Image (tube, rainbow, N blue to C red):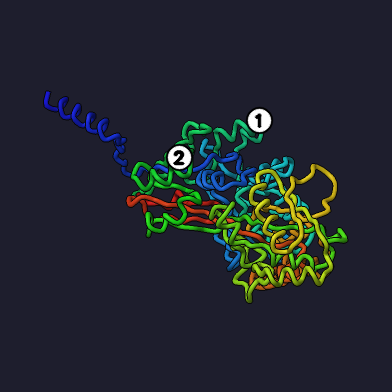
Amino acid sequence: MRTRLLALLAAAAVALTGCTAVEPARSGALTAGLQEPGTLLPADVDDQAGRLVTGALWTPLADYDPASGRLTPRAAESITSPDRVHWTVRLRAGGRFHDGTAVTAKSYVDTWKAVAAENWAATPVLKESLCAKEISAPDPVTIRIDLDRPSGQVPALLSAPGLVPLPASVLASRDWNGFARHPVGNGPFRLENGWLPGTGGKLVRVTPAPGKANEVDLRVGDPVEQYDQVRDGSLDLATSVPGERHEAMHADFADRHTTWPLPEAGYLVFPVRTPRFADATVRHAFALAADREALVNGPLSEQVDPPKALLPPAEAPGERTGTCRPCSFDAAAAKSLLGQSGFAGPSTVYYDTGAGTWTGSLAAGLGGTLGVPVTAQPRPSDGPLDSPSTVDLKANTPSPAELLTGLAAASGYADPGFTQDLAAAESAASPEESGQLYRVAENQLLRDLPVVPLWTGHGHAVWSPRVHDVTATPFADVQLADISV
């Protein structure tokens, strides 16, 4: 009778105060908030939430750090080549998918054939970057890759999270949508009972680790609400911080928050073959007229940083020497350069779906600074552009070549010296030499300026006092396997 009375009194207290009872945390269990992933098919992931989940479900062949050129084998035991043309990948023995089947060299070869045949985010890694003449599996733990030219970028390309293996069952059925709801990987966690859109899913560690998060309850929700839930103690981890909580984060979570670079950046891309924008002086005027701080603090809501180089930090091969003059805002110099060029408005800035708000703000700022009418319009569905456009580029690999090549192609920029620098960087004998040559190519783009850097993306996370050892990487987001609870 007394026990029942106490329970009734506790329930009444909750009702009177309007509070929600916080469920006690279980040892080894973690609750984590995230936004809805676009897909859980790893070869087609291009968003932060998708990278978080697939990064827990799969183990890549290796991790590659473009700043140092360091390769850290993961599912691979080694990635080697005697001449940078013929490459050998040795897999760690005993790899298994979550369905119990073996992960073999053939798993990778067959998966890569499927990726190359589809129009997925990772497809260009194989068809445009790797460009192998032949990929084979001579035995269960060996992958052989033969190229048509020397390339030292193979380790960086093979570390792409989109090139992880898929089990034979989905490669046979080709039910990609069904697989994305019930993914089967080779990573430290398996997904129990599949993914429920709008709700989330439960990750269970394949091999329990003492002191670590062995179960992760992934909850899809609003970032503002999730931030407040972590602060109030009803959620352990929020993997995004909205702009309206950005300043409060430093006080609310003084030593319990982190920020990391994302493989994403925004650019203003010029149609350099159009006469009005063929003069580099015009392009430099537009570059100096872009108020990046206003974009960061305004429509981009503190989710990005002003750029310090053409390449974002997630792709940068080491530290850049010197400042990036075209990355700065200088209204007087911008107007002076435009006057010297003889450029007369008006101009348009085109944008893709979802970028209208921040592109509109950019266009208004450019027009006000330069003294010419500049308007924002949706990108036409076909035909060449007659004015610059904003582009949000997302990298699939940590190789700088991917973004440098993509930026040149987007603008129609072609220069023999730039092409030679990229080829020399790809075939360089060491990561240090390669990094220096990629910086040379980057400097040429900053000089000729077919594209203007506007912002670089970053991720945020905040966590409760019971959570420790939170780290994040550009291509796998928060490392759930490393978290201690």
Q: Which sits in the foreground, 375 or 260?
A: 375
Q: CA distance from mark 1 to mark 2?
A: 28 Å
- Residue 393, numbered label: none
Q: Is residue 377 above or below residue 425?
A: above
- The answer to whether the residues at label 1 and label 2 have Cβ atoms under 8 Å apart is no
Q: Is residue 250 left or right of residue 102?
A: left
Q: Is residue 463 left or right of residue 188?
A: left
Residue 19 appears in view? yes
Q: Is residue 109 above or below residue 295?
A: above
Residue 400 appears in view? no
Question: Which residue matches tag 2?
Answer: 218
Q: Residue at x 49, y 53 (%)?
A: 460
> Element under label 2?
strand
Q: Is residue 26 left or right of residue 456?
A: left
Q: Residue at x 64, y 62 (%)?
A: 291
Q: Which sits in the foreground, 172 or 365?
A: 365
Q: Is residue 328 above or below residue 53?
A: below
Residue 144, image x and y in percent? Answer: 69, 53
Quarter holding residue 344:
bottom right
Q: Residue at x 75, y 50 (%)?
A: 350
User: Is the residue marked by circle 2 packed among few (<14), some (14-19), or many (20+) residues within 10 Å?
Assistant: many
Quarter holding residue 157:
bottom right
* Residue type at tag 2: Leu
- Residue 173, numbered label: 1
Sequence-wise, which precedes: disc 1 or disc 2? 1
Residue 376, image x and y in percent? Answer: 72, 50
Residue 75, image x and y in percent? Answer: 55, 52
Q: Is residue 16 left or right of residue 268?
A: left
User: Is the residue marked by circle 1 packed among few (<14), some (14-19), or many (20+) residues within 10 Å?
Assistant: few
* Residue type at tag 1: Ser
Residue 62, image x and y in percent? Answer: 57, 56
